[in-house]
Image (cartoon, rainbow, N blue to C red):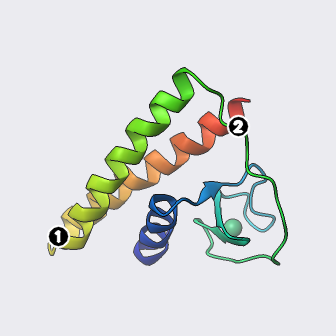
Amino acid sequence: MTEELTKKAADMLLNGATLLREPCPYCTGVRVMKEGYALCIKCGREPEKKEVPAAKIPESTSSTIKKTIEKKMKILSTELENETDHEKQQEILKTINSLLETMGKIKDDK
Ligand SMILES: [Zn+2]
């Protein structure tokens, strides 16, 4: 996953994008979707525009975790923006990546 893709995905999520339940048809990566625009965070492909219902978020615990992750994402996104050290950028990106994966798993539970 490239730095640019991760940041794009994080930005999309912060702006109300949802994670798609269906994995990427090319690489089975996690995809985020906003306003009919789906982006795979692994390979960066953007399959055809189509209406895919967003995965259901189970209430209670999962939504609490999701909120926490979203807060973290916001912080990490700002950190990434201001970070000039390349190694630290990679560290931040790794964290963002695992947060995205966690979010995907939460949604897949239900
Ligand atoms: Zn993909």
Could you tell me residue 7's position as x and y percent? 41, 70
Q: Which quadrant of the view contains residue 105?
A: top right
Q: Residues within 10 Å of mark 2 (few under 14, many from 20)?
A: some
Can you tell me which quadrant of the image ligand 1 is in?
Answer: bottom right
What's the residue at 44%, 67% (across, down)?
11
Asked if the residue under mark 1 is in contact with the one under mark 2, i.e. CB atoms within 8 Å, the reply is no
Residue 87 screen position, x and y as percent: 21, 66
Q: What residue type is labelled 1?
A: Glu
The residue that disc 1 covers is 83
In which quadrant of the rendered view does residue 43 lie?
Answer: bottom right
**On the image, numbered disc 2 is attached to which residue?**
108
* Callout 1 crowding tier (Cα within 10 Å): few <14, some 14–19, many ≥20: some
Establish if 48 lies above or below 105. Answer: below
Q: Answer above or below: position of 106 versus 93.
A: above
Q: How many marks?
A: 2
15 relative to 49 in the view: left or right: left
Horizontal side, residue 95 vs residue 27: left or right: left
